[in-house]
Amino acid sequence: MPSIQFRPYRDTDADSGGKAGFGALPEWDLDDLYPGPEASELVRDFDWLEAECRAFSDDYEGRLATLDAAGMLRCILRYERIEQVAGRIMSFAGLRYYQDTTDTERAKFIADAQDRMTAATTPLVFFSLEMNRIDDAAMEALLAADDDLGRYRPVIERMRAMRPYQLSDELEKFLHDQSTVGASAWNRLFDETMAGLTFEVEGESLGLESTLDLLTDPDRGRREAAARALAAVFTRDIRLFSRIHNTLAKDKEIEDRWRGMPTPQTARHIANHVEPEVVQALRDAVVAAYPRLSHRYYALKARWMGLDTLQVWDRNAPLPVEPPKTIDWDTARETVMSAYADFSPRMAELAEPFFDKGWIDAAVKPGKAPGAFAHPTVTDAHPYILLNYLGKPRDVMTLAHELGHGVHQRLAARQGELLSATPLTLAETASVFGEMLTFRRLLDNAQTPAERKTLLAGKVEDMINTVVRQIAFYDFECKLHAARRQGELTPDDINALWMSVQAESLGPVFEYMEGYESFWAYIPHFVHSPFYVYAYAFGDGLVNALYAVYQESGPEFRDKYFAMLEAGGSKHHKELLAPFGLDATDPAFWQKGLDMIAGLIDELEAMED
């Protein structure tokens, strides 16, 4: 079933819902899913789902291996419809919850919906288990016998990739049943704890988003006060966050051990349909590039700021030449939409409904989930975008990013429920490409050298946050899960792992205040989606290479680009990139993207002369 995935924290996230000067900020209209939690349509769908799951089990359990191609196609189409209805229900429950995670009614609604969903879909556990027990030759014969069935080959192959790690039917049903009181419960505890935190900054009580946003304040004293407030609260609650991470890592270790997974990362690589050696090549290339990327840039930034060393609250500080700037919502919309339209009117047309039909929730409100994400919901509805808009230039880039996801999800929806979901390694393609289009438009329109410098520096910092920082996060997770397999981790143990990757990735120009060692606590990906983070670096490197092809190509690039997005999850990354002459399995591929970042830093250094 579809799940809500958070986009990366850019360390500029923020919480002041009614902040003036932005214009009217849009809110979600969830009626396209259901009119409300008591809606008769919701009752109808849940009743249908429960009955259909039982009927599906009655019709097919123990019989999948006996089906001919036509029968297997009918079976998969019924399963796809179940996925669609279940996804609509849980999308509605999840989106309502993330609008206000502190609302007890919404929290109860999603918990009850999850419990009922788990019970309803338990009869379906047999499906993947039996599919995976069908002999390879027999399955190949079925897929070759019917083109309509053959279309589902990618879904079946991804399912069968789990064959070596499949447990007994009884154990698989047990894991399914206990999921709501396992990892899901710890996820909810994390979400609700984060949403309820308050931080005292210079006499003002702020939520997480507003406090993080102050790390980009022009006033260095305000940035320091915010960083120390974050450190104080995270340190105060560090035992709770340590317990959450210890429990989830141990839960994962137990399941991985029973399944025979060779590494903690294996399940993520299978889900992403990417080879471990490709991810390792990406990781190694980025780590090797730390000195010429983040180390070099932050040393340059220290000189701009007149400092011998940087503190953590200086990392995302605006440049001294950058005047404070608040961008209203209409300007943000026009900036992104014009960049999209310049690339292709079709892209702008696909993006337009998000603004006009209640598909974006932009305002920062108490209890609202932090960060930003785009959730595809289901293929017979449309995506929804969550933002926490505070009028910063980087908020405009976040809008461009999430809108790229939305366009991608709309295009991929034509593949149907089972084939529309794009593996995470390619899911960041349209979002990062949308950011690049917006950045290039702003850069082309820069009026002064100072404005150009500001734009270049902002883009470099975003790229460092997306590539360097996310790979450092990945290394932290790898170290965390490896260490947890040796025993319980104390808060100090986890803090030490965090600091080891921070010092390596940020470089020698930084000093670290007391308390910064606890900043791992607020990163949601470690809780919600272990090892998700490398997808951001993958996407950025891919788009940098893709954009270079775009600059060298003619109009045919746009057709290839839209075809790639429309493919959704129906093709492997190697097949999707081939029309552009790109291959992510080639170690040199990643250097192209890293060279683009280095080139922007070269340009910034040249401005010093």
Image: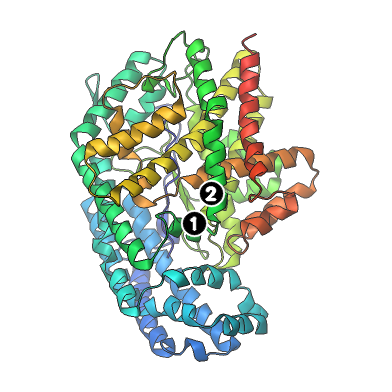
Q: Calculate the distance from the C-alpha at mark 1 to the C-alpha at mark 2.
A: 8 Å
Image coordinates for residue 102, horizontal then vertical, percent: 24, 47
Number of numbered discs present?
2
The type of residue carrying mark 2 is Val
Image coordinates for residue 276, horizontal then vertical, percent: 52, 54
In this rendering, does residue 427 appear at all?
A: no
The vertical placement of 124 against 225, above or below, is below
Q: Do the CB atoms of the residues marked 1 and 2 lie less than 8 Å apart?
A: yes
Q: Residue furthest right?
A: 554
Task: Give the residue drawn at x 48%, y 63%.
Answer: 378
Is residue 19 rendered to the left or right of residue 158? left
Image coordinates for residue 439, horizontal then vertical, percent: 61, 31
The vertical placement of 308 against 363, above or below, is above
- Report which quarter residue 179 is drawn in: bottom left
The type of residue carrying mark 1 is His
User: Dot 2 lies on which element?
Assistant: helix
Foreground of the two, 352 or 237: 237
Residue that badge 1 annotates: 269
Residue that badge 2 annotates: 279
Is residue 127 rendered to the left or right of residue 424? left
Locate the C terminus by quadrant: top right
How crowded pointer 1 is (Cα within 10 Å; few <14, some 14-19, many 20+) is rated as: many
Task: Give the residue drawn at x 54%, y 21%.
Answer: 296
Q: Which mark is residue 247?
A: none
Foreground of the two, 396 or 421: 421
- Report which quarter residue 389 is drawn in: top left
Q: Residue furthest front?
A: 486
In this rendering, does residue 532 appear at all?
A: yes
User: Dot 1 lies on which element?
Assistant: helix
Task: Give the residue drawn at x 46%, y 30%.
Answer: 505
How crowded pointer 2 is (Cα within 10 Å; few <14, some 14-19, many 20+) is rated as: some
